[in-house]
Amino acid sequence: MAVVSEAPNRSILKLPQKSPAASPPTRKQVADNRAKKMAEVIDWLRTLPCCETVQPLAIGIHARLSHLRSRTGTRISVSSLRRALKWWTAQRSYIAALAADGSQRVDVDGQIVGPVSEAHRTLARSMLAD
């Protein structure tokens, strides 16, 4: 005959209750936080010579900005920087600057690095036409 033992005391294994402050953030809180971070990054971008005025940025400027960000100790995440650059380059005024005849691309220091290619200029013009 087998002896059935009592169930172990489960109170020892119980995890503490989560406090209300530990609940996950709501979608609105996440969106507000993301918008706040992006505004901070855009403010930082506007301090750079390349973004003092709206002009076409150099191809691959993201890598240079990431390096500059890490070198200066700026607390900006890579994803926030990407999001801000996407917003910056989607502005109608930026697209108009790309579409302009004779427009030149600039690097982080605001120095001209070359002309906007005809393919990019044509694409920008089609975007403005829509």
Image (cartoon, rainbow, N blue to C red):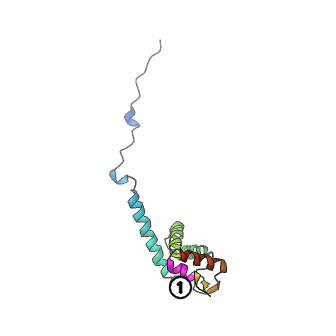
Horizontal and vertical percent position of residue 107: 60, 82
Dominant SS type (magenta): helix
Q: Is residue 46 above or below residue 37?
A: below
Residue 89 in magenta stretch:
no
Horizontal and vertical percent position of residue 21: 34, 54
Q: Which residue is mark 1?
A: 49
Residue 15 location, quadrant: top left
Most foreground residue, 121 or 26? 121
Q: Which residues are magenta?
A: 92-97
Q: Is residue 21 above or below residue 8?
A: below
Residue 104 location, quadrant: bottom right
Residue 95 in magenta stretch:
yes
- Which structural element holds mark 1? helix
Most foreground residue, 93 or 26? 93
Most foreground residue, 6 or 59? 59
Q: Give the left or right position of residue 32, taking residue 95 as reference.
A: left
What residue is rendered at 53% in x and 66% in y? Answer: 79
Callout 1, which amino acid?
Answer: Pro
- The extreme left residue here reads 20
Horizontal and vertical percent position of residue 63: 61, 73
